[in-house]
Image (spheres, rainbow, N blue to C red):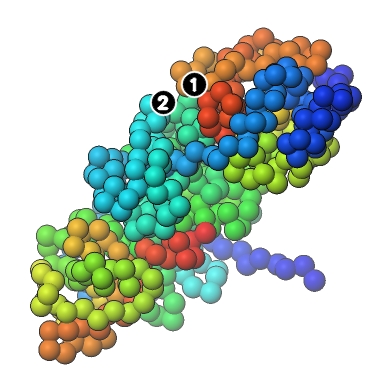
Amino acid sequence: MQNKEKRLVFRPARHEEKRVFKSFLATITTCKYSTILQNRLLYGLYGGFFIELFAITQNMLDLILLLNKTDVQPYSAGFPLGIVKKGGFKPSLPLAKILFKKCRHQTLNFLVLDEKAERKYLYGRDVFVDIKKTKQPYTIRKQDYVIVVNTRFDVLGWGFIVEKVKGKVKLQNIIDVGWYLRSGG
Amino acid sequence: MERKRLALANITVSRTAIRLAKRYGYLPYMVQRYIDMLGVDEAEKLLRANEEPYLRAIRCNDYLIDCDKLVERLSEKGIVLEPIPYTRTGFAVKMGSDKIGFLHEYMLGYYYIQDPASMLPVESLDPRPNETILDGAAAPGGKATQIQQYTKDESLLVAVDVSRERMRALRSHLARMGFYNAILIRTDLRRLPDALGVQLFDKILLDAPCSGEGIVRRDPSRKTSRTLDDLLFLSDLQYELSTASYSMLKQGGIFVYSTCSIGVEENEFVIDRLLRRFPDLEPLEQTIPGVAGIDEYRGIKFDPRLKKCRRLYPHIHNTEGFFICKIKKKD
């Protein structure tokens, strides 16, 4: 039997996906969407097992509208923000990079890893971080999503603070740039 | 055209070709073609050069990091880099090449592993900010990321490829290196002109699928993996992809055709057909390294303007074998 592919369609993000994305942003930073992505439009790739959100330019939209009239669809377009699945949001690596670039000097959750923790984290593993040893510009709380950076402030990925006990935190690896090697192709 | 095609398909293999093929492990028809192209002495130099280890090189992504800083960071890890003079941000890896694909700096998108010859099609394309550019066979993304790097991600790139697996790699490389002003489309390029219906692009790069005869150093299986029929099949495919590219290119636009093959069938023969079909196409001079394209081969005369195309050879340029042609669609 021939394997029939699902037809994915690019269309403006619905209210629900916008809400999920903006709620996630609000937990990370006080930066507004307009500061991060200027006047890019929020679009979604619908029809798969999850909805992937992208920020696209007007130029891209013109081309996508041409393609929407045919059976040729974009595989991706513009800035990938993350995916919405079952009401939750999983942020993309590019989103971590742009947030760190544009919002670092406003309120932004980020955690600095020393060299040893960095090595372990980039293998896709969870790490314990002694936050007294590494200078942390931001007060880390349990249950926070954080952007993970190294001491040179290279953005390494996303994490989630599972535990915080006596100056140590357990960081759950959500996604790290090692993914580009392990799974990116 | 059919006469030329028949001449390409009809090869008599000499004893010398059989002897050299046996010595270096090639199919005899391939060696005969090298002899017809270059003469016996130079063909043997090519075969000998293909036995040398290939030069590992990277392209520093100066969109994300200052290249001096990258050189310094990698030298702390035992990697020695040397600039490649004819590229903007290319470096030969002189020491430590075995770990170049696994470093944190690679994951962070600070460089792309790429042969120097493979950096030249984009040098020739000379992409500029605000242009709409098509990369017609874009995966895995070496040239697509280079286009966006040179325009500081300010051109709109439409990157097309037919393979699902390779598309994944393309997307990953673009994201890794920080480029988002792109639309990725997984389709056969030949379907795109009907879908778009307009001449949309200022510039088009077609690094066409090919036999890979130029990358024997990197992949010795190419010495025996393609028959002459395969080459002629690829030649037709390359011509069709070029024709599709032509129909989406704006008047006054630039088309760069390249392959990592040194076969005349996949290069001059394709461009010769294209120039005959579309009289408004004009090959342009290029400032990249390389020797002139071939305008006569085994008694077949091609369009003399093909001399403006560039060929790179392992035995002359110490790169992969490559072919690059820059063509303007007249206003």
The x and y percentages for residue A8 are 56, 63
- Is label 2 in a helix, a strand or a loop? loop
**Occupied quadrant, residue A79:** bottom left
Real-space CA distance between mark 2 and mark 1, rounded to the nearest whole angstrom: 7 Å
Considering only order in the chain, which callout, 1 or 2, is on the residue closer to the N terminus?
2
Q: Residue at x 66, y 66 (%)?
A: A5
Q: Residues within 10 Å of mark 1 (few under 14, many from 20)?
A: some
Q: Are marks 2 and 1 in contact (CB under 8 Å)?
A: yes
Depth check: give the residue in front, B112 or A73: B112
**What chain does mark 1 sit on?**
B
Left or right for B283, reference A60? right
Residue B202 lies, with reference to residue A55, above or below; the image says: above
The residue under the point 32% across, 72% down is A121
Given the image, on which type of amino acid does mark 1 rest?
Pro
Mark 2 highlights which residue? B86
**Left or right: B72, with A11 as reference point:** left
Which residue is painted at 42% across and 70% down in the image?
A83
Label disc, if present, on residue B289 of the rendered structure: 1
* Rendered position, B80 above or below A18: above
**Where's the N terminus of chain B, which quadrant?**
top right
